[in-house]
Structure formats: structure tokens, C-alpha cells
Image (tube, rainbow, N blue to C red):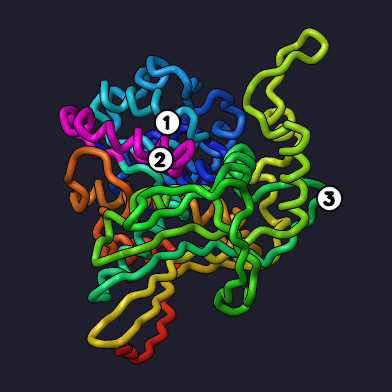
């Protein structure tokens, strides 16, 4: 029985996905698709030396449903590793061709809700759509679900993303998609409460607080940032959950640069006329930045992502931090990637493993926390992405 996979978008994360999926014998054919095929051709040549699967390269425009659908005739799963603004055209292609769909991020909280509303279309097509299955969102959701499953009640969930690294690059850069980094950090930060549902702070870089990450990272300043986890986790987890937020550790220089970009209007996605030429300000900024894949070997330090869940168990207050941590230099020496894109690329491939093994058989559209966390985390660990649990307990103090 054949099992064929398309990876759409062959940047840093897409390259990780490709390098991981070819390790399994279930794979019959891998298609590397991008609007620019240079990186895909180079990667395909390398992968053909290590895999018995057929590896093809196709030029595809992710913004065009027909273009995407044209390569999906015999494909089981499509991994969309491109920018989130093309999610809908790719989803439509998957519905039309009855292809399972996985992406790694949405184009904002409202867009995630709109994507999940495609559930009936995916069910009618008999396929599964998993929205936001990278590291965060993705692993972070599954880590939160795992922690909540250990508890009797859940009070709050905070997703924490911290990195203590330094980079050998003089200039403004981002370790993952620059477009996404600029957009989500300058958007109004969202959070969720049981009483008010999805809510927003009025300005970016809101509610800064200091959190202690596992050694050797330590204490970092973390900001509430726009992210997908707060959209779904509260309702999905239940157990009395009252509050969900995402916090991102941001270096002061990164924050100041983003504030200047925003002040100058250089974060805008709206075209402007410059000397008779239409240009998008944010695209100009992104063009001056290195691609995340180009930073491999230049980042030195640790990246940590996890879910910090507070609740109760057996009459005690319990705090669990379920997390993954990776050293950029060690990951580069081991697999040739920087840790951030590697941590993002492994989880969606684990979902492909579970589909191929018959462990993910449902249809419709789901957020990652709907996946059974135990088999998922087992397979993630088998692929070399370790995960850990920190636990703290205290007695419940009853007040009169």
C-alpha cells in the first residue's frame, strides 16, 4: 500500500519536515513543492541518497487552489509549511482532492476559528485537517493536554516560549518566519477567560512578567503575544479552566526594533506607491532579513517551549510544566538545522506517522490538543525531540 506526502513550502521548517518524514519505511513518495524550487531541488538530491522513496520536486503557487490541487491526485497527506495567509487556498485544494491537511500556524486568532469552521467540509471529504501543529502552537497544545490529563481540575494554562541564545548576525533577524514574527508580536495580544472568552490587550508587548525556565536558560522577561493556543485550549481542556495565555520571551533589542518598525509603518501589509512602484512595507523589511534556514550554525544557546498548567490533584495544588528544550549547536551538529525550525518541523511529521499507522482516523478540523498526547509524545521522543515534566505541589489552604 502506497503512502504519499506533499510538503508545501521548502524553507527551514519544510526542510526539517522532509528530512524527518523520509526516515520511515511507510513513505512511498515525497513531493517537495514551492513557488521557487532551488532549495527543494538541492534537498531532494540529498534525500535521494538516504531514502528508497520516490522524491519529486514541483513548482506550486500556494495562493492558487488549482496549482496546489494539481499535485494531490495520489497524495495521502499535505504538510503546509508555508506562510499562513495561504492556508485557505491550500485547504480548499485538500478538500477537493480528499487529502489530509496539516499546517503549523494560522494568520491570527480569528483566522484559526475560521479554519476550524471548515470542519463539515473536511468531514464530507472524509479527511482530517489539523490546524496549527508546529512547536507552538502544536507541541504546546499537546503538552497542555497531557498536563491537564494528569489533574483533577485545571485553573490556568500559560504557554511559555523562551530562548537564551545569541546569534552570529549583525542586524535584525527572527529564528522562524519573519513575516509571522513581525505580525504576531505587533498585533494586539490575545488571552482567554472562562467568563469573557477570547479577549485582547489594547497594545502589543502587554503585561510583561519574568518567568524561570529550566536550566540552563533561567529567568527571562516574557510578554503576552498574539497566538493560537489561547483560542482553543480553554474550551478543549475544560476541567474548570479559567484562564489561558501565551507568553514569549523577547530580547529588549528585538522589542525596540519592532516598535520602530511599527512607528514608521514598516510592519504594514498594505501596498504603498514608491516612485511609481507598488511595494509592501513589511515585505521590504523581510527581504532585508536572513531566512531562518540561513541561521543554522550561527545561533548559540537553548530554546524551550512548554505548557505551564496550574490545577489540583487528590486534594493538592499542582503546577506542571511540560516542555521540550534543545541546544541550537547540538541540533545543528546532529541534523544540520537550528533548533527553532527543528522543533517546529518534527511535531507535524509525528502526526503523519500516526495517520500512516492508523492512529489518527477521525475526520473534520481539529486543534492539536484533540490528538491523544501519549502516543504522540512517544513518537516525538523516538524522533529525538525529548520532552520533560517539572512538578510542584502544595497543600490546598481552605479559608473560612
Q: Position of residue 123 (x, y in %)?
A: 17, 33
Screen quadrant of the C terminus: bottom left
Q: Mark number for residue 170?
A: 3
Report the residue at 39% width, 36% height from top: 30
| Mark 3 in CB contact with mark 2 (< 8 angstroms) | no
| Mark 1 in CB contact with mark 2 (< 8 angstroms) | yes
Q: In terms of depth relative to the viewer, which is nearer, 54 or 40? A: 40
Bounds of the magenta segment: 102-129
For marks 1 and 3, the one nearer the N-term is: 1
Q: Mark number for residue 87?
A: 1
Disc 3/disc 2 C-alpha distance (Å): 31 Å
Q: Position of residue 218 (x, y in %)?
A: 63, 77
Q: In terms of depth relative to the viewer, which is nearer, 77 or 241? A: 241
Residue position for label 2: 103
Q: Is residue 311 left or right of residue 384?
A: left
Can residue 150 be spotted in the picture?
A: yes
Reply yes or no: does residue 221 show up in magenta: no
Q: Quadrant of residue 64?
A: top left
Screen quadrant of the N terminus: top left
Report the residue at 26% width, 63% height from top: 375
Amino acid at each position: 500500500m502506497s503512502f504519499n506526502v506533499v510538503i508545501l513550502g521548502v524553507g527551514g521548517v519544510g526542510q526539517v519536515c522532509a528530512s524527518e518524514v523520509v526516515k520511515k519505511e511507510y513513505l512511498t513518495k515525497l513531493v517537495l513543492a514551492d513557488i521557487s524550487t532551488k532549495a527543494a531541488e538541492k534537498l531532494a538530491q540529498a534525500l535521494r541518497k538516504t531514502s528508497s522513496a520516490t522524491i519529486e520536486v514541483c513548482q506550486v503557487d500556494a495562493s492558487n487552489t488549482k496549482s496546489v490541487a494539481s499535485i494531490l491526485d495520489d497524495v495521502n497527506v499535505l504538510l503546509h509549511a508555508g506562510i499562513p495567509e495561504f492556508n485557505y487556498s491550500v485547504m480548499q485544494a485538500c478538500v477537493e482532492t480528499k487529502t489530509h491537511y496539516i499546517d503549523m500556524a494560522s494568520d491570527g486568532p480569528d483566522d484559526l476559528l475560521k479554519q476550524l469552521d471548515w470542519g463539515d467540509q473536511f468531514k464530507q471529504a472524509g479527511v482530517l485537517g489539523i490546524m496549527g501543529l508546529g512547536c507552538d502552537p502544536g507541541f504546546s497544545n499537546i503538552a497542555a493536554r497531557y498536563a491537564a490529563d494528569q489533574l483533577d481540575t485545571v485553573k490556568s494554562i500559560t504557554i511559555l516560549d523562551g530562548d537564551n541564545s545569541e546569534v552570529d548576525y549583525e542586524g535584525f533577524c527572527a529564528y522562524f518566519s519573519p513575516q509571522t514574527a513581525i505580525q504576531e508580536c505587533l498585533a494586539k495580544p490575545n488571552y482567554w477567560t472562562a467568563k469573557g472568552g477570547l479577549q485582547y490587550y489594547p497594545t502589543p508587548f502587554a503585561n510583561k512578567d519574568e518567568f524561570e525556565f529550566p536550566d540552563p536558560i533561567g529567568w527571562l522577561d516574557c510578554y503576552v503575544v498574539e497566538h493560537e493556543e489561547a483560542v482553543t485550549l480553554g474550551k478543549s481542556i475544560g476541567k474548570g479552566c479559567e484562564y489561558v495565555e501565551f507568553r514569549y520571551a523577547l530580547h529588549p533589542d528585538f522589542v525596540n526594533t519592532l516598535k520602530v518598525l511599527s512607528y514608521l509603518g514598516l510592519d504594514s501589509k498594505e501596498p504603498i506607491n514608491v516612485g511609481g512602484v507598488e511595494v509592501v512595507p513589511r515585505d521590504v523589511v523581510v527581504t532585508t532579513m536572513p531566512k531562518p534556514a540561513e541561521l543554522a550554525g550561527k545561533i548559540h544557546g537553548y530554546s524551550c517551549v512548554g505548557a505551564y498548567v496550574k490545577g489540583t490533584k487528590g486534594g493538592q495544588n499542582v503546577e506542571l510544566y511540560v516542555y521540550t528544550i534543545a541546544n541550537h549547536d547540538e541540533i545543528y551538529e546532529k541534523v544540520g538545522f537550528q533548533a527553532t525550525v527543528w522543533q517546529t518541523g518534527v511535531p507535524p511529521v509525528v502526526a503523519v506517522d500516526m495517520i500512516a499507522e492508523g492512529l489518527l482516523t477521525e475526520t473534520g478540523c481539529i486543534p492539536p490538543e484533540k490528538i491523544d498526547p501519549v502516543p504522540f509524545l512517544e513518537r516525538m521522543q523516538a524522533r529525538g525531540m525529548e520532552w520533560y515534566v517539572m512538578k510542584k505541589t502544595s497543600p490546598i489552604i481552605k479559608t473560612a
